[in-house]
Amino acid sequence: MFGKGLVAISSLALLGVAPPSTDAERMAAASKDILGACGDRDGWSDPAPPAHVHGRTWYVGTCGITVLLIETSAGLVLIDTGPADAAPHLLANVRALGFDPRQIKWVLMTHEHFDHVGGMAEILRVTGARLLTGTGAAEVMRSGKPAADDPQLSWLAKEPPMEPVKVSRVLPHRGTLRVGDTRFTLHANPTHSPGSTSWTWRTCDGGKCLTIAYADSNGTSSTGDYKFSHHPERVEEARHGLRVMESLPCDLLVTPHPGQSALLERLSGQEPLIKPRACIEYSASGSMRLADRLAKEAEGK
């Protein structure tokens, strides 16, 4: 479905037919059933069609990785890029909605793992955009090498390093970036990784305004022989991050893997898009998994 849609859009361009440019045309170009388009595919690089989230926020990621595109009065903002081999799909989705990728002025990010930002170097090259990170992720993005204190280091170290990129700006916890009429607030929540970051911003649709919370992963994953019980400082950082996510302004929850919040189901109308207490419940599920993990480590499992 997705491939045929892109072929059709490319064919229209060759015929001189203008790509989507109005809100109505963009809505028509966006999938109404991204869940059906992905089917049982949820791979990080499995192509998905673009979809509308709310207001001027669009889903341009894959079936397994969320990437968001936000329109502002001063250009576009992108959050995350997906893995390196998904960059062409992301750019195709941006164009399918009628946008020139060079309109992207800033790229923001959730956390510094290759499945979410491995395509950063290519996206920055194509768009000319600037990268903004939180303090915990900046050095990883500059070097392309995983952080030495990342609980998933043994897995990350086996993968090809990410291409180093220039970090144009670094924000602290609760720092803000204003792009035209939209203000993005950074929330440092080092639960999943040392540089984990969530973002919030306001978006309006037909007079109804909401705060979108792009909350980073709530899981405390590790690989190799890493045990959280041997790193009490890391446990406290993870708990702090979960408290941050619990307190996010959160009318509409989005997560880095769509399956973490039934996002594709919600974008396809199979479940309510807006769920009360979504961020509170998301944080609570992460806290339960962390407690279970620590209990198993204590039992020697």
Image (cartoon, grey):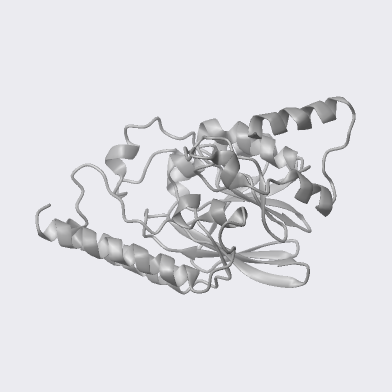
In the rendered image, which quarter is residue 223 located in? top left
Q: Nearer the viewer, residue 49 or 45?
A: 49
Q: Where in the figure is residue 38, as x and y percent of width and height? A: 55, 40
In the rendered image, which quarter is residue 266 located in? bottom right
Q: Where in the figure is residue 60, as x and y percent of width and height? A: 63, 45
Residue lying farthest to the left in this orientation: 300
Q: Where in the figure is residue 126, as x and y percent of width and height? A: 67, 34
Question: Does residue 137 sit above or below 290 in this rendering?
Answer: above
Residue at position x 30%, y 43% in the image: 153
Residue at position x 31%, y 51% in the image: 221
Q: Nearer the viewer, residue 61 or 40?
A: 40
Residue at position x 57%, y 46% in the image: 35
Residue at position x 53%, y 30% in the image: 85
Taking the image as shown, residue 200 lies to the left or right of residue 173, namely right
Is residue 237 in view? no
Q: Quadrant of the N terminus?
A: top right
Is residue 220 in view? yes
